[in-house]
Each structure stands twice: as structure tokens, then as C-alpha cells.
């Protein structure tokens, strides 16, 4: 049982990366965020990059509380704005490994403009987007990933807007690395985050995550959500991204996960080195 | 006090800075060159008239000195990117005008709360709203002070010449890094876009404030150590493993809802500026000592007012000028002796009444306060001001 022992040691090491004095954390029972934080911490430990070179940045929301529990340099900034903060920091300190951990509302709804332009510029940052289909922190309003028909506190008759298919959107915008996993796929998620650290350019993983608040309004408490994920998840790295939108209510629709895109295209920060050379007359 | 070093360090690195000497230069360009001399190595902005020369010149100059320029998708991203750069330990700046300045307000509050030193040049144009993009205004005085929510204090300079665009941009960086606050260079379209003579002094004469770094081991480091008025600042990647947040936080940077900690935090944050108002606040007086009427004017308006004062004097009227060089903190104390000996005041500004409210706050019922509002779009001529002087001159 040597593998079991390795896991135990790893948990102890992960603990050293946590601000344990801040526990208990704020997340509800069954929430997926804690698992993601553990996977990120594991990836940091395995990355070979010194811990002090990892920086974690977030906006406002439940997911955005993640940096507050990590013993790394962390910035918890305004709702919707972690991406530009990360871009500013990475641009002046290229030796840092800068990761944004935040929610769907933060990154895709209020922060959607920064998301699309950071991908277009190909900023060299990692984004861990925890998609719980709702605004958890503010009590359950809808956002840009809420599924059609879902009941939220601001769509009491059912959500009619339509939602982003995150990997399809990110891939279409040109992101270098695009993945989707769930808290059930801890090994795969650690692996995906490790891959993201290696990418020069924009890298994103969407985590399809259970939420008590969403569950309470939509008959999908976290345990049921995890069961649903277990039954319906299909791993397909080659999936046609246009078809992998998530419909939680259609029992026949698979939830497709995988590492979908991994392409090489220099980041803004790498290309800017060429600009500096040019501006200095080739020096 | 933060550590001060001479510029020679940058010069030793052979960075292509503007050399000491006399130049004929645009205000916006002078601000860029000053920023580079002050050590600015990151610019984030979104184009807006009449500030564009700053972004354009930065995009050419920053890579020459090894810095980074990014034109962002909007002003919200720009101001937030400055906070990221500041926490990388790098001096950063943006430039904008009214509409963009409005979009930056939430970020300015964030910078204040998280104690990120950043510099914003606001080249004021005519408002309200999109207003007069190419023409002068001075309507952002109160926005600079109150534009973000909650209690905060701001530092804002009021350059009135190209020389001051240079000098006060350097001072803005110094104040930002001395007090860990956002600082505004609150200029206007005329001063930003005019071209006139400036002198870049020898580098040894230019004082530059740099980041005060922590002197304790990482285990003892507190990002918001309240034993200091201005806590030393660690940069990301240095091994301090700090957590900072724009939520109300304790000395460790952890969120809290404790009223006691909220009181301590907000009190310290505003005290950084309030306790130093006389160190930061600055003004200039001209022929004020015996004046029976003192004009209060700033930025481009102060230049027309100065001329009006000269002409009034020629006509035998005892008129002087008080020119605030900082809007915030407002140097109210500089007027006291004049008011105490009975001088009346006349405020002239290109807006419908902003600084005049501050004057009333300090001197209402103590002396007569006259006001000459001026709609945005043009600068009042000296003759316009002279007319007003004659209308209100005490006899
Ligand atoms: C400018 C601004 N608007 C609104 C809010 C209120 N707010 C805080 S968190 C949040 C939504 C969070 O949702 P999400 O990002 O999906 O994160 P979750 O809490 O679900 O993890 C909102 C609307 C805010 N803090 N700032």
C-alpha cells in the first residue's frame, strides 16, 4: 500500500501551504471549492517552481476566498478584476507563476471583458475558474453560466438568458490551454494545473462544481450533484467544443471534461521582450 | 521616512532617461519623462483625449528603459493592473480624462484600501459626461476627492505649467511610495497640451522615494502592521507570503468584521494623509501680503488670474493671488493670515463651484467669499477676471 502512504505525506505537505489559523473556512458543506484549493496546492508543491514564486489572485465571491487560505503571496481584490491585477503583476515580474482562482460571476460575468481581452493578448497567466452556476457569495442570483431554466433568487420563474460554454468560448478566443474538470477528478485536475504552469500564455481550467445554494433552489444538493457528475461525466480530450455546453437538467446530456486545447503561441509578456530589444536598438 | 536614493542608480544602468537641461516640451510629454526619471516602469491605460500623448509617448519610451506598456481594454483594467504592478514592487502609472477617471474610481478605492502606491494623471476636459473632449475643464476636483465610496483620503496635485507637469509628477510618485496611497496629478487640457520651456535639473537634485522594504523575517511580517503609520511593503515573490485584501482586514491582511479593527484600520488609513497634510499640501502666493482681495485659482486658470492681478495692481487695486498646488490635501492654512487681517477672497475656477466649497468650509462667516464660476470649454481671459475683480473689490 505504498501509494496510500504517499497520499498521506502529501496531505501533510499541503497543510503546510495552508493558513490553518484561518480555519474553519467559510465554505458550505459539500462545496467544491476546498477540493480545488487542495489540488492547486498539490500542483504548487509538485511544480518544481519555488513556493515563493507562486502568486494567487482573486476577485470577490466564495471561490475568490481561496487565496485567503493559501500560505502564498496572495491578492484578494475587487469583484471582477483579478485578471488585470494578475496581468499587471506578471508583466513586471515575469519570474512569478501567477494564478487567478475565482468564480464564474467574477471572471466571466462582471469580469468578462477582461477575460476575453486577456485571452486575445495571450497574457501569461493561469485561470482556475470555479463554475458553480450561480452567485454563491451574494445569496444565489444568476450569472453568465447559470443553466437555462434554473431557479435563482433573481430568476424565480426560471432563467431565460442562456449561458456561456466556457471551454468553447476560451478556445475560440485563442487560449493556449483549455481544460474542464470536476472536484471528482483530483488527479486530473492537479495534472491540468501542472500543465497550465508550463504554458507561456493564457491557460484556463473550468471546474464544474457543486454548490449548496444552487442545489437548494434546483433540487440538486451537493451530494446529488456529485452523483450526477459521476454518472454523466465523459472524458474526451478531443471533444467538439461547440457541443460541450452543460445542461444539468437533461439526464441524457454528458458532461464532457478533459484537457481540450494545448497550443503554443508566445504570450504578450514574451513578445514584449522583443519590443524592448527593438526599442533599445537591438541591445 | 522612506529611504531616499539619488537617481544615479538608474543612470548607472544606462537607462535612456531625459538628460538634465532646458527643453521646449509639451506638458503631457514632460509628465512621462518625469515619471521615467522617478522610476516608473509600468504603464497601463486606455486612450482618451486630451491625455493621449501620455500613453503614446509611454509606449515608445517605456521599452527603451526596460519597462512595460499595455493598452488595456478599459480604464477599469488599467487601474487594477497598476495595483498588480505595485505589488510587484514596480512604480506604475496611468493617464486618463473625466470619463475614464470615473471608471477608475472603484479601483482607486481598492488601491487606497490595499495600500498600493500608484499614480494617475487626470488631464481634465470639459464635462459633464462625454462633454468637451478636446477642451479644458476643471470639473474633476471633487471627483478626485469623493469619487470612490467609503472613507478615504487622496493626494492630488494641480500643475499650472509644463515645468510643474514635470516636477509634480515626480512628487506624485514620491508621495505615492512614501504613504502607500494612490496619488493624482490633476492637470487640465491646456496645461497638458501646451508647449513651453522646462528645465530638467541635475539628477543629484531630484529626490526619489523608493519602497520601504520589510526588515523582519517572513514569519513576523505583517502587510498592514499598524505599529507603523505607513507599514513597510513586501513585493510578491520576495518570500514574505503576504495576503492582502480590499475587504476590511487586520494587520495580517485577513478579512474581519470586527468593529474595533475596522475603526483602527480606517483611522490609520486616513491618518496617513491627515497627519501629514502640511507636509504634502502646498501653495504659492503672489502679491498677497497687502492684498485686500485675494484671488484663488489653480492650474491654467491661475495663469490668467496672475495676469489679472498684475493689471489690477497697475490700476491701483490691492489684489493678490493664492494658488493651491495641491487640491488635496487643500492648503487652507496658507490663507489664514490674509483672512485674519481682513482680506476678502475671490475663487475663479473652470467649473460651477468646487474649490469654492472648500474655501467656504474654512472661511465662511470669517470673510467675504466671492465666486466666479466659468463653464468648461475655455479659460477665462485676464480681462474677464479683471471685470469680476472690479465688481467685487472691497471699498
Ligand atoms: C462591483 C461589485 N458588484 C457587486 C458585488 C457583489 N458581489 C460580491 S460576490 C458577487 C458574485 C459572486 O459570484 P461568483 O463570482 O460566481 O462567485 P461564487 O460566490 O459563486 O463563488 C457579487 C455580485 C461586488 N462586490 N462588487
Image (cartoon, coloured by chain):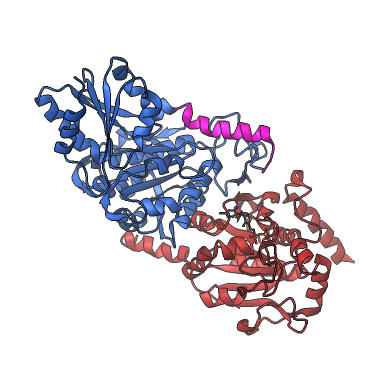
Image coords of residue B48 (percent x, y): 34, 57
Secondary structure mostly seen in the magenta stretch: helix
Image coordinates for residue A230, horizontal then vertical, percent: 81, 75
Q: Is residue B45 left or right of residue A232?
A: left
Q: Given the current orientation, which residue lies at the most extreme left position?
A: B314
Q: Residue at x 32, y 60 (%)?
A: A279
Which quadrant of the picture is home to ligand 1?
Answer: bottom right
- Front in this rendered view, residue A104 or B367: B367
Q: Vertically, is A198 above or below B9?
A: below
Taking the spot 39% from the left edge, 65% from the top edge, the residue there is A274
Residue B366 seen in render: yes
> Residue A37 versus residue B164: which sits nearer the camera?
B164
- Of residues B172 and B11, the one drawn nearer to the viewer in this rendering: B172
Residue B200 visible in image:
no
Q: Colour of chain A?
A: red
Quarter the C terminus of chain A occupies: bottom left
Q: Position of residue A90 (x, y in %)?
A: 51, 57
Image quarter of residue A33: bottom right
**Above or below B322: residue B342:** above
Say which quarter of the image contains residue B233: top right
Residue at left 54%, top 36%? B232
The image position of residue B5, as x and y in percent, is 40, 35
Q: Is residue A148 above or below residue B136?
A: below
What number of labels is visible? 0
Magenta residues (range): B255-276
Instruction: Output the letter for the chain in blue.
Output: B
Q: Residue at (43%, 61%) from the top-left corner?
A: B72
| B268 in magenta | yes
Amino acid at each position: 500500500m505504498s501509494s496510500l502512504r504517499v497520499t498521506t505525506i502529501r496531505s501533510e505537505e499541503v497543510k503546510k501551504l495552508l493558513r490553518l489559523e484561518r480555519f474553519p473556512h467559510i465554505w458550505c458543506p459539500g462545496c467544491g471549492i476546498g477540493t480545488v484549493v487542495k489540488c492547486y496546492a498539490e500542483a504548487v508543491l509538485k511544480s518544481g517552481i519555488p513556493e515563493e514564486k507562486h502568486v494567487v489572485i482573486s476577485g470577490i465571491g466564495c471561490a475568490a476566498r481561496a487565496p485567503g487560505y493559501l500560505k502564498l503571496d496572495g491578492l484578494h481584490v475587487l469583484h471582477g478584476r483579478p485578471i488585470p491585477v494578475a496581468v499587471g503583476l506578471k508583466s513586471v515580474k515575469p519570474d512569478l507563476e501567477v494564478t487567478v482562482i475565482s468564480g464564474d460571476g467574477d471572471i466571466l460575468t462582471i469580469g468578462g471583458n477582461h477575460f476575453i481581452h486577456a485571452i486575445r493578448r495571450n497574457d501569461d497567466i493561469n485561470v482556475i475558474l470555479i463554475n458553480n452556476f450561480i452567485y454563491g457569495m451574494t445569496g444565489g442570483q444568476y450569472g453568465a453560466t447559470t443553466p437555462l431554466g434554473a431557479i435563482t433568487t433573481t430568476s424565480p420563474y426560471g432563467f431565460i438568458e442562456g449561458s456561456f460554454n466556457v471551454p468553447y468560448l476560451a478556445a475560440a478566443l485563442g487560449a493556449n490551454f483549455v481544460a474542464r474538470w470536476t472536484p471528482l477528478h483530483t488527479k486530473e485536475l492537479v495534472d491540468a494545473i501542472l500543465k497550465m504552469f508550463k504554458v507561456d500564455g493564457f491557460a484556463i481550467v473550468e471546474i464544474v462544481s457543486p454548490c449548496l445554494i444552487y442545489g437548494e433552489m434546483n433540487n440538486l444538493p451537493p451530494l446529488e450533484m456529485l452523483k450526477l457528475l459521476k454518472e454523466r461525466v465523459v472524458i474526451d480530450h478531443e471533444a467538439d467544443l461547440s457541443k460541450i455546453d452543460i445542461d444539468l437538467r437533461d439526464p441524457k446530456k454528458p458532461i464532457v471534461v478533459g484537457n481540450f486545447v494545448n497550443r503554443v503561441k508566445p504570450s504578450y509578456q514574451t513578445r514584449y521582450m522583443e519590443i524592448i530589444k527593438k526599442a533599445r536598438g537591438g541591445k | 521616512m522612506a529611504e531616499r536614493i539619488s537617481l544615479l542608480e538608474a543612470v548607472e544602468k544606462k537607462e535612456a532617461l531625459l538628460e538634465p537641461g532646458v527643453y521646449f516640451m509639451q506638458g503631457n510629454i514632460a509628465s512621462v519623462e518625469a515619471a521615467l526619471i522617478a522610476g516608473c516602469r509600468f504603464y497601463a491605460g486606455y486612450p482618451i483625449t486630451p491625455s493621449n500623448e501620455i500613453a503614446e509617448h509611454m509606449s515608445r519610451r517605456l521599452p527603451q528603459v526596460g519597462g512595460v506598456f499595455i493598452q488595456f481594454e478599459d480604464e477599469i483594467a488599467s487601474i487594477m493592473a497598476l495595483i498588480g504592478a505595485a505589488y510587484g514592487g514596480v512604480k506604475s502609472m496611468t493617464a486618463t480624462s473625466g470619463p475614464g477617471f470615473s471608471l477608475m474610481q472603484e479601483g482607486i478605492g481598492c488601491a487606497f484600501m490595499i495600500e498600493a502606491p500608484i499614480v494617475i494623471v487626470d488631464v481634465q476636459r470639459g464635462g459633464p459626461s462625454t462633454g468637451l473632449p478636446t477642451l479644458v475643464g476643471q470639473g474633476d476636483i471633487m471627483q478626485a476627492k469623493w469619487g470612490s465610496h467609503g472613507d478615504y483620503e487622496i493626494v492630488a496635485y494641480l500643475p499650472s505649467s509644463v515645468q510643474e507637469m514635470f516636477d509634480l509628477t515626480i512628487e506624485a510618485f514620491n508621495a505615492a511610495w512614501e504613504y502607500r496611497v494612490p496619488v493624482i496629478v490633476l492637470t487640465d487640457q491646456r496645461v497638458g497640451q501646451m508647449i513651453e520651456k522646462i528645465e530638467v535639473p541635475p539628477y543629484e537634485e531630484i529626490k526619489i522615494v523608493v519602497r520601504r522594504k520589510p526588515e523582519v523575517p517572513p514569519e513576523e511580517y505583517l502587510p498592514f502592521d499598524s505599529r507603523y503609520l505607513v507599514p513597510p511593503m513586501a513585493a510578491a515573490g520576495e518570500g514574505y507570503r503576504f495576503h492582502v485584501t480590499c475587504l476590511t482586514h487586520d494587520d495580517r491582511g485577513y478579512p474581519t468584521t470586527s468593529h474595533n479593527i475596522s475603526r483602527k484600520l480606517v483611522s490609520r488609513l486616513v491618518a496617513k494623509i491627515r497627519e501629514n497634510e502640511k507636509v504634502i499640501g502646498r501653495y504659492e502666493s503672489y502679491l498677497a501680503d497687502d492684498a485686500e482681495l485675494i484671488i484663488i485659482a489653480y492650474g491654467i486658470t491661475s495663469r490668467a488670474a496672475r495676469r489679472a492681478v498684475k493689471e489690477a495692481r497697475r490700476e491701483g487695486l490691492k489684489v493678490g493671488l493664492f494658488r493651491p498646488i495641491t487640491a488635496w490635501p487643500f492648503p487652507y492654512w496658507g490663507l489664514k493670515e490674509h483672512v485674519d487681517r481682513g482680506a476678502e477672497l475671490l475663487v475663479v475656477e473652470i467649473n460651477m463651484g468646487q474649490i469654492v466649497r472648500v474655501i467656504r468650509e474654512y472661511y465662511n462667516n470669517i470673510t467675504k467669499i466671492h465666486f466666479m464660476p466659468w463653464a468648461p470649454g475655455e479659460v477665462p481671459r485676464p480681462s474677464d477676471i479683471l471685470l469680476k475683480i472690479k465688481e467685487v473689490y472691497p471699498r
